[in-house]
Amino acid sequence: MEEKKKIITNPCSFNGIRPAMVDLPYPPIQISGRNQSYADLLSVDYCGAVSELSAITQYINNENRISCEKCAMAKTLLSIAVAEMMHLQKLGELIVLLGGNISFTAKMRNGKRKMWTPEYLNIPENVGKMLLADIEAEKGAIRQYEMHIQMIGDPCVQAVLERIIKDEEYHIMMLKALLQEV
């Protein structure tokens, strides 16, 4: 007689997850003119050490590791990851419009290209440290976006980056609230 094997599942349901974004419209994805230098700057935001790709990967990893024990927190992290995916898509559109390529390599200031790597991620085991790392990553992204806004002379691109910053600030607020639960 065969023994019945017990099926193990994750009790956390991710149905209905929506992106964690400020309830404000995004400016149109458009540019004033092609500019490879601006595309190169945005490539760093797209897939550099401090980037949307790094944020997405870090949030998904964290969400996966805690979802069985901390479902509500995992859902929040996933909703932030989905917002970061939206940012990645918008940056990709801008890069292409500006004349750049999406190759998962960021053009650094020294002119060298560096391919994205998971070495960019900060993945602590402790949930509190995990949230602190996420907060620091969001702050780093804001600083980088602010620097790029100063370096980019296209008001269309600047407007999109300024709008992304609003979401990143919202994410910090959400993460700080989660940190108080730990």
Image: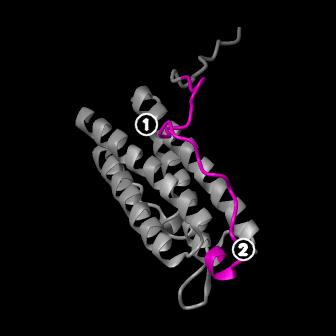
User: Could you tell me which quadrant the N terminus lies in?
Assistant: top right
Name the residue: 40% across, 44% down: 170
Is residue 34 on the magenta stretch?
yes
Of residues 99 and 152, the one nearer the viewer is 152
Mark 2 or 1, closer to the camera: 2
Task: Decide if residue 69 is on the left or right side of residue 63.
Answer: left
Q: Which amino acid type corresponds to the residue marked 2 in the rendered image?
A: Gly
User: Could you tell me which quadrant the C terminus lies in?
Assistant: top left
Q: Residues within 10 Å of mark 1 (few under 14, many from 20)?
A: some
Name the residue: 62% across, 56% down: 88
Q: Which amino acid type corresponds to the residue marked 1 in the rendered image?
A: Ile
Q: Quadrant of residue 97?
A: bottom right
Tell which circle, 2 or 1, labels the residue nearer the N-terminal end: 2
Tell me the SS state at disc 2.
loop
Say above or below: 12 vs 41. above
Name the residue: 62% across, 76% down: 38
Measured as percent of width and height from the top left, residue 59 is found at 49, 47
- Residue 33 — which label? 2
The residue under label 1 is: 66
- Give the prevailing secondary structure in the magenta stretch: loop
Highlighted range, magenta: 13-39
Task: Decide if residue 163 is on the left or right side of residue 174.
Answer: right
Is residue 41 on the magenta stretch?
no
